[in-house]
Amino acid sequence: MDQQTIKYYNELAKIYDDETKDFWERFPTTIIDAFVGLTNGKILDVGSGSGADGLILQRRGFEVICLDASKSMVALSSQKGLVSIEGDFNELPFSDGSFDGIWAYTSLLHIKKAEIGVAIGEIRRVLKAGGSFCFGMIEGDKEEYRESSEIKMPRFFSFYKKEELETILTQFGFQIIYFEQFQPKSKNYLNFICQKRQMAVG
């Protein structure tokens, strides 16, 4: 993951947490409901941030492991009572097939497009056969550093068209079983739930 972006979250973790903690109160929770209906067991939250999503999933009855590249974010999610690990999205510290479900909501947008396949491959590796993968991204066609209007410190973002994401997911052996989008303001959120299928051999 981009080091400047990790620095942003390390230095501004509490501010970011305060700004985003009511995200699922402001935006539709249908993606959460769909994921919960399709998933059982142990969940890995990749790019878990301060643990807001992980806490929602835990309250829905899941065993949740949170993983984030920011030490400060891991500290915040740990304070919420979540099992939280500092780690690299491109090298997940888990054995093959460790999880029944993977949740990665607007976290992989901080990975360069040239590296997205590595992260998706790692997610596939640690997900059980038939397991569910929730993948949320933001629509666009650029990759760039951006500053928010309130905080003059850049983060790296990769934006994708829906068709790009569909191609990537299919290439890595995921079957898309649910899709939705919502556009509260200028950003169009692209939300997928996929199932890990067997890759053809030969």
Image: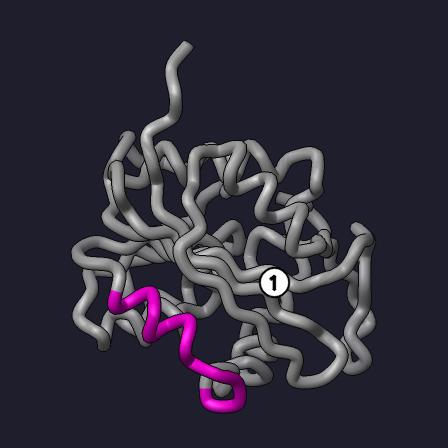
Q: How many marks?
A: 1
- 72 w.r.t. 24: above or below: above
Count neighbours of disc 1 (C-alpha within 10 A) and say few if under 14, some if 14 to 19, many if 20 or more. Answer: many
Work out whether residue 79 can be spotted: no
User: Based on the displayed image, in which of its 4 quarters is residue 183 positioned?
Assistant: bottom right
Question: Is-magenta flag for residue 176?
Answer: no
Q: Is residue 106 left or right of residue 152?
A: left
Q: Secondary structure at mark 1?
A: helix
Q: Position of residue 52 (x, y in %)?
A: 41, 74
Q: Position of residue 65 (x, y in %)?
A: 29, 55
Q: Which residue is mark 1?
A: 9
Quadrant that contains the C terminus:
top left
Amino acid at pointer 1: Tyr
Q: Residue furthest top?
A: 202
Instruction: In this rendered view, identify the residue nearer to me: 165 or 99.
Output: 165
At 40% across and 55% down in the image, what residue appears?
177
Question: Is-magenta flag for residue 36?
Answer: yes
Work out whether residue 138 can be spotted: yes
Q: Is residue 11 left or right of residue 52?
A: right
Instruction: In this rendered view, identify the residue nearer to me: 2 or 136.
Output: 136
Instruction: In this rendered view, identify the residue nearer to me: 159 or 112.
Output: 159
Q: Which residues are magenta?
A: 25-37
Instruction: Give the dominant element type of the magenta stretch: helix, strand or loop.
Output: helix
